[in-house]
Image: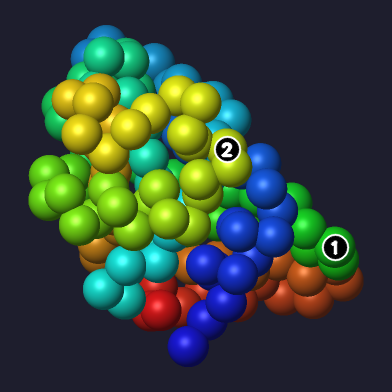
């Protein structure tokens, strides 16, 4: 089991990269992850461009810097419309999310990684690439 969930949780801020419909890369900061049903989840607002970009092209990456190195997760983000997935996200991140969302506000939506690889970079060492497994 790799430590992607713990790494991104501890990092606090991480960056999500997507592409627009014309192929332009877009990068933005995110701050909430959750682990639900052994999958790594992210949260966003279904009115934002990032939501539309993920529906059009689910290939994405997240990246964060931590003590002694950094980590990247590359894969496809799939929307999970189930209420229990949103509840899990809110329960893990209530302090940061409750001012923006409620579980049933019709704005909050969550995505999870599938077909994902984790690349870990430690200072002075070769990168380690493995399948994302929680």
| Secondary structure category for the residue under label 2 | helix
Q: Earlier in the sequence, mark 2 or mark 1?
A: 1
Q: Position of residue 27 (x, y in %)?
A: 52, 26
Residue 131, can we see it?
no
Q: Is residue 21 left or right of residue 42?
A: left
Q: Position of residue 114 (x, y in %)?
A: 25, 62
Q: Give whichever of 4, 102 is nearer the camera.
A: 102
* Residue drawn where x is 87% and y is 71% of the image: 124
Residue under label 1, please give it: 67
* Residue drawn where x is 66% and y is 41% of the image: 13
Q: Position of residue 21 (x, y in %)?
A: 23, 15
Residue 114 to residue 105: above or below:
below
Camera-near label (2 vs 1) is 2
Residue 23 to residue 134: above or below:
above
Distance between the Cα atoms at labels 2 and 1?
22 Å
* Residue drawn where x is 40% and y is 66% of the image: 35
Write down the quadrant of residue 3 in the picture.
bottom right
Q: Quadrant of the C terminus?
A: bottom left
Residue lying furthest bottom: 1
Write down the quadrant of residue 37 in the picture.
bottom left
Please tell me how crowded label 2 is: few (under 14), some (14-19), or many (20+) other residues with Cα within 10 Å. Answer: few
Residue under label 2, please give it: 96
Write down the quadrant of residue 15 in the picture.
top right
């Amino acid at each position: 089991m790799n430590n992607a969930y713990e790494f991104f949780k501890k990092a606090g801020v991480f960056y999500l990269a997507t592409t627009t419909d014309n192929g332009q890369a877009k990068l933005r900061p995110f701050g909430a992850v959750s682990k639900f049903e052994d999958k790594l989840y992210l949260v966003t607002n279904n009115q934002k461009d990032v939501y539309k970009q993920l529906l059009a092209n689910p290939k994405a990456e997240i990246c964060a810097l931590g003590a002694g190195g950094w980590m990247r997760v590359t894969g496809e983000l799939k929307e999970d419309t189930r209420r229990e997935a949103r509840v899990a996200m809110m329960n893990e991140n209530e302090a940061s999310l409750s001012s923006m969302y409620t579980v049933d506000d019709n704005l909050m939506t969550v995505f999870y990684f599938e077909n994902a690889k984790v690349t870990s970079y430690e200072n002075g060492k070769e990168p380690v690439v493995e399948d994302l497994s929680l």
